[in-house]
Structure formats: structure tokens, C-alpha cells
Image (tube, grey):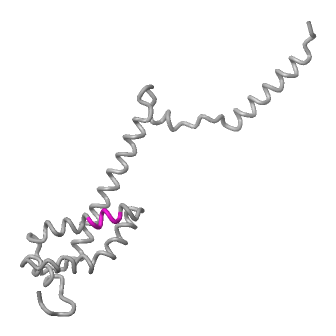
Amino acid sequence: MPSESHPSDADLAQAHLDGDKQAFSLLVERYGPTLLGYASRLTGNPEDGSDMAQETFVRLFEKLPQLDTSQPLKPWLFKVCTNLCRNHAKRKKSLLFSQLEKVDDDESSSVAELLEDKEPSPSEALLKATTAKIVRRAVQKLPEK
């Protein structure tokens, strides 16, 4: 690896491909914090963001031999991270809906029925209270046996 104080991405990538084990670590140090913040914002969750950033570097490690190292790595890293976060969100959403559909397997309830508000509306509650009041008054007026 060149003895520059700040080697370029291309130099680090080539050094990694040439067997320098520290070169990849330097790429992770260079882009890790920014990528972690970006992924955490996209996922809305620091743990998921950490997983997505880590997976981005796994992809870099796997794909580095095929990449054009003369091109900057940053756009590639952020594009991969964006795609990973989108796919993660789709899987999470799909999982949520499949769990909602399985909430009550014993009965044939649809998701709409499960999400339906079981509380009476204010007008229904007022009607019920008024009816109960009228019935109580009518019962009080009945003669005793």
C-alpha cells in the first residue's frame, strides 16, 4: 500500500486486492460512521441501520474484485446501502402484514375485522344510555306485585 497519509479509495481497494489486510479496515473506518448514520436514518432504527451498514461492507468485500477501482467507492457504497435498506423495509412490511393475518387463525377473521373498532360510536353510546334510562323509568312506574 502506498505510504501516503491519506491513500485514495482506489489505492486502498488495490492494496486489499493485493493482500493487504489493513486496507479494507481503512475503507470501513473511512466510510463506516457516515454509512451507519445514513442507514440508521433510512431504517429509523439504529440496530437495523447497523445491520444494513455492515451488510454493505460485506457486499463491498465480496464485489471489490469486480468493481472498477478507478471510480470512487462512496457512490457505490451509498447506492448498495440504499437498496439494502429499501429491501429491509419491504421485508419488514411484508412480515407485519403476514403476522396481522395470522393473529386469529382459529377464527376466520379478516385483517379488517381484527382492526375494526369495537367501541360504540358516541351517538350509539348516547342512544344506548337514553334507552336504558327510559327503560329504568318505565320499570319504576310498574306496580309492585
Image quadrant of residue 59? bottom left
Q: What span is in magenta?
A: 49-54
72 in relation to 91, above or below? below
As drawn, which residue projects farthest toward the bottom? 4
**Most foreground residue, 31 or 91:** 31
131 in relation to 14, above or below? above
Residue located at (35% from left, 64% from top): 49
- Residue 14 placed where, x, y %? 10, 80
Task: Tell me the quarter of the image containing the N terminus.
Answer: bottom left
Image quadrant of residue 34? bottom left
Query: Is most of the magenta stretch helix, strand or loop?
Result: helix
As drawn, which residue projects farthest toward the front? 21
- Residue 136 placed where, x, y %? 84, 22
As drawn, which residue projects farthest toward the left? 18
- Residue 21 placed where, x, y %? 14, 77
Residue located at (44% from left, 35% from top): 103
124 in relation to 47, above or below? above
Task: Tell me the quarter of the image containing the C terminus.
Answer: top right
